[in-house]
Structures are given as structure tokens and as C-alpha cells.
Image (cartoon, coloured by chain):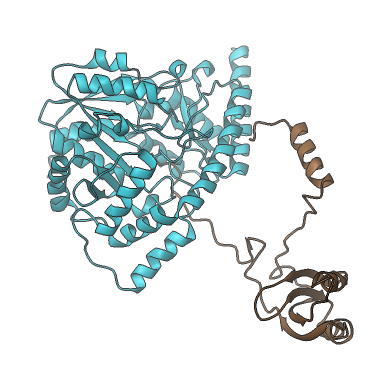
Amino acid sequence: MLDLSVEQVQAEIARLEKEGIILGYQAIVNHNKWDTDSVTAVIEVKITPERDGGFDRIAARIAKFEEVQACYLMSGGYDLLIVLEARNLRAVAAFVAEKLSTVEAVQSTATHFRLKTYKENGAFHQVELTPERLAVTP
Amino acid sequence: MSIRIADTVREIPRSGIRDFFEVVQTMGDVISLGIGEPDFATPWHIREAAIYSLEKGRTGYTSNLGLPRLRRTISDYVYNHFHVRYEPLSEVLVSIGVSEAIDIALRALLNPGDEVLYHEPCYVSYAPSITLAGGVARAIPTYAEDNFILKAEAIEKAITPKTRVLMLNFPTNPTGAAMPPEELEEIAAVCIKHDIVVLTDEIYSELTYDGKQHFSIAAVPGMKERTVLLHGVSKAYAMTGWRIGFVCAPVELIEAMMKIHQYSILCASIMGQEAAVEALERGEQSMVSMRREYELRRNYIVRGFNDLGLECFRPRGAFYVFPKISTMGLSSREFSLRLLREKKVAVVPGSAFGPSGEGHVRCSYATALDQIKIAIERIGEFCEELRVSEAAA
């Protein structure tokens, strides 16, 4: 399709992986069909930046927790946006109370829970039916 | 009592595609490479714009020529893509797809017995539309060895004192051929010399590959005043069902076409026109990503056919390949029918696009890649079985 050989494509992918341009591959799971007990929370965090490291050192520290799926520095009313996946509500509460709020630079947090997913990483969770076409047309 | 049908209509054959469609309808589970429309739904932002206009209660007639806003958008779009400037309010008409535009253009141009030249294999409606408009259809065959382009010498040979119009369709349905600008310039010179009007159906113009830009004959100096440029949103913006096409032409011809259009159609649907504004003004990105997908599939399917030993011209545009099947010892109709019955793959016999399409079949790659892969495998099995049975005979 790309008019390249399989070997050429494999070599290119290997190069992108080696140079850290491709960081990984993930499956997008439809939670409407594969229900797990885990909960996903989005947490807005306000922090006091440090004189030397700005937000980076604190963000990196928070991002290292295994439950943290994503961590972004945001413009606007808060500083960090964290996507957290945990076993249950209690685990999220424990993370916020024990790990996150206790970081010295953290001023405040606001936690929101995911109720339903409509679209994730470009994929729709409610699959639209393919529109029907006539079998042969001019 | 039997109702008498007008001679002209009775004598027009039914489309070969229609016959074939009826056979396919009786079978389930068929992989179809026979579909001449995008497999994408119209991009969401375009559908959403149409919903918004409905919500605002924009449900009435429009001007016969089409919404002024759409005509201004078309004028800018044509200027940006084809490098020809048309006056939006007098040189543009919005039609019900290119099909209606072809019909009204021919009816506005032809007197009984006037001859119309067109290249073949071609879209199924050309010859019947010419006949219905009272003209005489004169096909000029094109050949795989010329990459299915039309040669100026061939036109020159076909011209008679009655030749009035030349119809062009590049990129071509069914071959995917595109014309190099220098060849179009030669054709333009012939048309100017013999005072011929050019009707150019450029519905696939955005779908050109290998980074090549489409070139319109209307952009050749001296041609705008004798060219009827036909285009629309169906193919590039996946909007076949909206039925929105347009014509750009000299004012006196637009006036003449408008007379027919206003009495037979009145105007194109306002909802479709509103959607077309969105498509032409903001649809570029969606179009480019669909084109990229078509190009990848084209590369796959061309290689697939050639690997099967069915010689396949690498099309420059549209979304069709036109592989040669005459080496398999069957007519294109027989090949297609047996392929359908034995392997449940639908392709369109080349003969449906005129006698010079014989020996080929048209396969559309406006079909999901996984379907194309299965279809190619099955066609491979079919050809292998044909070769084995031929060797045994």
C-alpha cells in the first residue's frame, strides 16, 4: 500500500521505537462490553510552582504513581490534570487524601469520576452501524 | 391496453449496471467492488451543518440558480482549485448532481442531429443523455496502452461538420485515467480550431494521486468561453445522496440551462445546498484524509491484480481500477457473472461502459481494505480455477 517492502516498514517502526518517538501501543477497550470494577477519575490539581523546577519536578513526582494514567500541565483555573485509574472509589479517595494532597506544593484538588465513555482516543464506544449502500452503482 | 412508449426512450438500452445489480440483489453475502460511491459517510461537520440549517427552519425553495452564498463559495472554490474565475451570480448554476447538469447542458446546446464526441469507456449516462437531447453520440475509444487518455489526433479524425460538443471526464469513471496538461492543451487547440464546445465532467478532480494536481481544460487560455465545467460534492466529500452538483459556464449558456432547470427541477434542495457550503468552505481536511485512504487502497489493489496476472493500469485518479481480464478467455460479462456466482464477488463488466470497455472489469476501491483483501484472494482462486479447467480442456 505504501509501496514499501515489509522489511522497510519494519525497519522504520524499529527506528521510531528506538528513538522514543513511538512510546507504546495500547488497546482501546469498550467498557460497555468489558466491564471491570475499576474506576476512572479526573483530578484537577492546583500547585505552587517551585522557584527552580517550576511545575516539572512536582508533576513528574505525581506522574510516577502507577495509578496515574495521564498527567498534563494545563492553562486556566488549575495547573495539573490527572487521569487516575484505581480499583474502586476507596482507592481513589486514598490516593487523593494520602498521596496527592500531602505533596507540599499541592494547594487543592477537585476529583471527578467517569460515568460513561462515548469516545476515547478517537474510537467511539457506541458503534455506529455502517450505512447501507446499493450493491452495484454506476 | 398497452401504453406506447416514445421511440427514443424505447430504443435506449437499459444500463448494463442495472442488469447486473438485479443479479447481485438476489444473492446474499456478496463482497462488492461494484459500488461507484465513497464508503465513507459524509463527514460529521457537514451533516451537522445541514441539521443546523433544518433547525433554523431553512426549508424553502432557493433561487433557481442556487443559494447566492453557495454560488459565491463555488466561484472561490473553482478559482482556488481550477484557477478559473467565474462570476458567482451569473456564471454558476447549482444542479441535482452532475447528472442533471449533463442533461440540461446537452439540451441547451444541441439541435437535432448535432454530433457529440466522447471518450470511451465512459460513464454509463453519456450516450443515452446525448440521444435524449436529440444529439448523435460518437464514441472515441481509448486504450489501456495509452493509459486510457484521449488523443487530440483521435478527436480530429472523428470530427465532422456536424460535431458540436466534446465531452470529457478526467479522472475517468471507469478507468481512473487522468490527462496530462500538455495533452489537454492539444485537445483545446483542436476544439478552438473546429469551434467545438467542451463539456467537462470533473467530478473526481480532487481524487488525484501521487501528489499530482488536477488540471482543468477550462484553464487553458481561450477555453473558458467554450467550456462547460461540471463538478459537485458527491465524490470528494462523500455526499452522493445529497445530489448537489454545479455548472460553471459562460453567462448565455447558464441562462439557457436555467430555463430548462427552472421548469423541470426548480432548484436543488436547500438542505443539500447548505451542506455543500460547509463542504466546500471547510471540508478540505476531511477530503484529504479520505483521499489518502483511497490512495493506499489503490496501491494495494493495483499490485493485487498485477500479482494475479491480470494486467492492471495504475489509475491516476477516481476510485476505480480497470484490470484486463481478456486473457482469461471469457467476455467481461461472463467473467463478472461467474465470479459473482462462484466466488460471491461483484465487479462491473467493462462492456457496461461501452464496447471499448470489453475485456476489462471495473473494480471500485471505495470499499474497506479488509473487503478488498478478501475480494482479491477470491478473484485469485477464480482465475486459478479457470486456468486449470482451460488446461484440462
B37, B19: nearer the viewer: B37
User: Which corner quadrant of the image does residue B180 belong to?
Assistant: top left
B347, A16: nearer the viewer: A16
Quick check: B280 left or right of B366?
left
User: Which corner quadrant of the image does residue B36 belong to?
Assistant: top left
A42, above or below B124, in the image: below
Q: Residue at x 40, y 64 (%)?
A: B49
Q: Residue at x 68, y 79 (%)?
A: A115
Q: Residue at x 58, y 38 (%)?
A: B297
**Residue A102, percent from left and from top:** 88, 85
Quarter of the rendering occupied by the C terminus of chain B: top right
**Residue B232, percent from left and from top:** 34, 46
Q: Is residue B309 visible?
A: yes
B115, above or below B27, in the image: above
Quarter of the rendering occupied by the N terminus of chain B: top left
B98, B82: nearer the viewer: B82
Q: Residue at x 68, y 70 (%)?
A: A32
**Residue B229, percent from left and from top:** 28, 38
> Which residue, as the protein is rendered here, is positioned at the far front?
A51
Name the colour assigned to chain A in the rendering.
brown
Quick check: A55 left or right of B195?
right
Q: Is residue B232 visible?
A: no
Chain (cyan)? B
**Residue A105, percent from left and from top:** 84, 82
> Which residue, as the protein is rendered here, is positioned at the far left?
B111
